Image: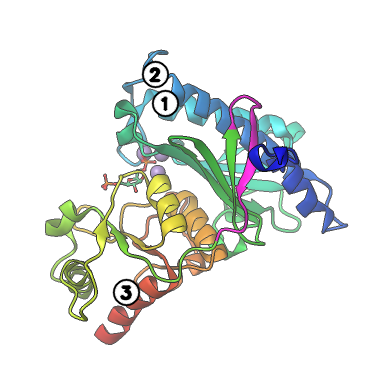
């Protein structure tokens, strides 16, 4: 069968989003247009990443962002590409980027009804050695009657209408949710199109992998309760007391890649608070929320140490939070340790 060897009925991401749109007769197609501009940004960054070493895109840009991180050339380039793509979509309003201290308010003539929060290039420390990196985004709808203010994005993650990431890995994979499950699309470079390759992703109920920067153990915020909980979890992962096999440790250091593996293979990804980062390292709006949204859509859980991650009400746009996300049962275990400690 030719069709077995070669797909002939291609579900592109545009076709998929249009299908979703048709289920909502009131929809005006704005989200579809916005998403297609985000997809364009992802294709551009993918192509830039693929030739980073050749196009002199490796190394520092010379500036420091509001988080105190040195910006890489690719952080700056990706940020510019997404800002331009979003503005030119005519569907965006308030934009929040990791690389911009303040929110960006799209000029009145180009304004739309959606707010986009994004991490243009995730995993900056992995750029120069060619390890997987990504882009993360979350989309809110403007509040009824709002002209676009920061209040439109200081909303819990459960209010997002869509979230996704694109991983620039051994292939370029975009995982998207518009609130009806999580779907994965792989870029076919010869077509320049993202094709549905991972329909309705379901994270395994329990995993065999834990993913955390254990090199931070000395700095985990000892001697707090959470310090003992994480140490206990990690210790149990290595020396199980119930006769099960030890878990494998996988940690790439690019949230996109670590979460992508967690979605497909199961397990838990953690970035707890530590002495250097008393609220954890990962940013609520454009890292914790979109990833938590996707993980929940795939049947997993996401927990902050205090509650459901998507319930956080952020007070400022670059706020951080500790995060534990992944397979339902694995996150349940962390939650039980926290409850027992109360
Ligand atoms: P970014 O490159 O967007 O600043 O994000 C880096 C984040 C995230 O990708 C990853 O999970 C984490 O930093 C890794 O941090 P450590 O190097 O401290 O483990
Ligand atoms: Mn950064
Ligand atoms: Mn990041
Ligand atoms: Mn980044």
Tag 2 and tag 1, C-beta contact below 8 Å: yes
- Mark 3 touching mark 2, by CB under 8 A? no
User: Does the magenta run of residues contain 199?
Assistant: yes
Q: Quadrant of the N terminus?
A: top right
Indicate the quadrant where residue 269 lies: bottom left
Q: Mark 1 points at which residue?
A: 74
Percent coordinates x, y for residue 90 in the rendering: 74, 35
What is the C-alpha distance between the residues marked 3 and 1?
36 Å
Which is more N-terminal, label 2 or label 3?
2
* Disc 3 to disc 2, C-alpha distance: 40 Å
Determine whether 5 is above or below 214 in the image: above
Instruction: State the separation of the CA atoms marked 2 and 1.
Output: 6 Å
Closest to the observer, 336 or 315: 336
In the rendered image, is residue 36 in sight?
Answer: yes
Label of residue 57 in the image = 2
- Residue ranking furthest to the right: 25
Q: Which of marks 2 and 1 is nearer the N terminus?
A: 2
Q: In which quarter of the image is the C terminus?
A: bottom left
For residue 60, side relative to residue 295 (left or right): left
- What range of the chain is rendered magenta? 188-201
Q: Callout 2: few (<14), some (14-19), or many (20+) C-alpha neighbours within 10 Å?
A: some
Q: Does the residue labelled 3 lie within 8 Å of ligand 1?
A: no
Question: Looking at the picture, how far across and down is residue 301, in whole percent?
Answer: 46, 69
Helix or strand or loop: what does disc 1 sit on? helix
Comparing marks 3 and 1, which lies closer to the viewer?
Answer: 3
């Amino acid at each position: 069968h030719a069709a077995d060897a070669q797909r002939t009925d291609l579900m592109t991401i545009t076709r998929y989003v249009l299908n979703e749109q048709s289920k909502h007769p009131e929809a005006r197609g704005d989200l579809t247009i916005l998403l297609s501009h985000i997809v364009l940004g992802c294709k551009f960054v993918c192509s830039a990443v693929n030739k980073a070493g050749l196009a002199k895109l490796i190394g520092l840009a010379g500036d420091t962002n509001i988080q105190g991180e040195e910006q890489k050339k690719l952080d700056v380039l990706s940020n510019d590409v997404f800002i331009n793509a979003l503005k030119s979509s005519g569907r965006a309003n308030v934009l929040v980027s990791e690389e911009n201290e303040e929110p960006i308010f799209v000029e009145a003539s180009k304004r739309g009804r959606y707010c986009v929060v994004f991490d243009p290039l995730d995993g900056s420390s992995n750029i120069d050695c060619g390890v997987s990196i990504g882009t993360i985004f979350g989309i809110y709808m403007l509040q009824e009657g709002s002209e676009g203010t920061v209040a439109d994005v200081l909303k819990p993650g459960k209010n997002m209408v869509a979230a996704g990431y694109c991983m620039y890995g051994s292939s370029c994979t975009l995982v998207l949710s518009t609130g009806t499950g999580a779907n994965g699309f792989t870029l076919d470079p010869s077509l320049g199109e993202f094709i549905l390759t991972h329909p309705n992703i379901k994270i395994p109920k329990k995993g065999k992998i834990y993913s955390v920067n254990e090199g931070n153990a000395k700095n985990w915020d000892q001697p707090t309760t959470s310090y003992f909980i994480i140490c206990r979890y990690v210790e149990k992962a290595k020396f199980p007391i119930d006769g099960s096999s030890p878990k494998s440790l996988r940690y790439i250091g690019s949230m996109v890649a670590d979460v992508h593996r967690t979605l497909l293979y199961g397990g838990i990804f953690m970035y707890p608070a530590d002495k250097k980062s008393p609220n954890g390292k990962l940013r609520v709006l454009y890292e914790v929320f979109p990833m938590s949204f996707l993980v929940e859509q795939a049947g997993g859980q996401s927990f902050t140490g205090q509650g459901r991650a998507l319930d956080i009400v952020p007070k400022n746009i670059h706020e951080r939070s500790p995060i534990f996300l992944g397979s339902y049962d694995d996150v349940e275990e962390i939650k039980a340790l926290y409850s027992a400690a109360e």
